[in-house]
Image (cartoon, grey):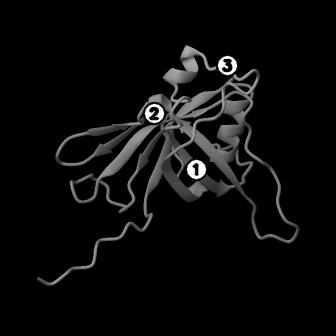
Amino acid sequence: MIEMARTRLKGKGITFTYGLTEYQCDLTSVVLEKASAPDNSSVDGTVTFCDVDAGADSGNIWQMNITAVQSTDNSPEKSLHMLIWDLAGSLGGGELDFVFAPHGNADPTVEQPHFTGTVVVDAGAYPSVGGDAGSDSWTFDYTFVVKDDVVNRVGDSGPFTAKADK
C-alpha cells in the first residue's frame, strides 16, 4: 500500500464578525484549543456551582488565542483592537461570532470543514497597547473564552458540536 501525504492545515481563513463587519484582515495568528479554565475560586478557594458549570472543576474549556495588529482605526469600520477595547470598556463586555475556515474555502465540506462559535470579551479585559521601539508595527495577544464551551464543526455531513468535557 502506498502512503499518501496528509492534507495540511495552512491557516488561510478566519473571520470574526460583529454586526456586519468582518475582521480577518486584523489577525496574524489564531489557535482554537481546549485549555485550563481560569481560576474562579482564587479569592478563597471555594468552587461554586457556577464555577463547576463553567468547567472550572475539570479544567476543560474552549478558548481562542489570537495575535492581531494594534490599530486605532475607528472609521469607516473599527479595527478589531478598537472593537475589543470598546467591548471591554464602555459597552461592558460582549460577544464576537467567529468562522474559522483553516483551508480558506468559502463553503464547508467534510474534508474541509469550518469551525464556528462565539467568543466572549469580558468587561475590563482590554487588549494591550504598545510594543518595542523601532518596530514596523505592533501586535497584541488576546485570549477569548468560547461561549458555552461550544465549537461547531460544519461540513457536508451536518453540524457537529464539540463541547468541552466537564
Q: Residue furthest front?
A: 45
Which residue carries the number 2 mark? 149
| Amino acid marked by disc 3 | Thr
Mark 2–mark 1 Cα distance, whole angstroms, equals: 14 Å
- Residue 42 percent coordinates (x, y): 73, 27
Q: Who comes first in sequence, dot 3 or dot 1? A: 3
| Residue lying at 21% horizontally and 79% vertically, measured from the top left | 4
Secondary structure category for the residue under label 2: helix
| Amino acid marked by disc 1 | Asn
Q: Is residue 137 left or right of residue 109?
A: right
Mark 3–mark 1 Cα distance, whole angstroms, equals: 28 Å
Secondary structure category for the residue under label 1: strand
- Residue 146 percent coordinates (x, y): 50, 36
| Residue lying at 37% horizontally and 47% vertically, measured from the top left | 115
- Residue 108 percent coordinates (x, y): 27, 52
| Amino acid marked by disc 2 | Asp
Q: Who comes first in sequence, dot 2 or dot 1? A: 1
Which residue carries the number 3 mark? 46
Nearest to the eye among marks 2 and 3: give it.
Answer: 3
Pick whichever, 138 or 56, lies toward us.
56
The numbered disc on residue 65 is 1
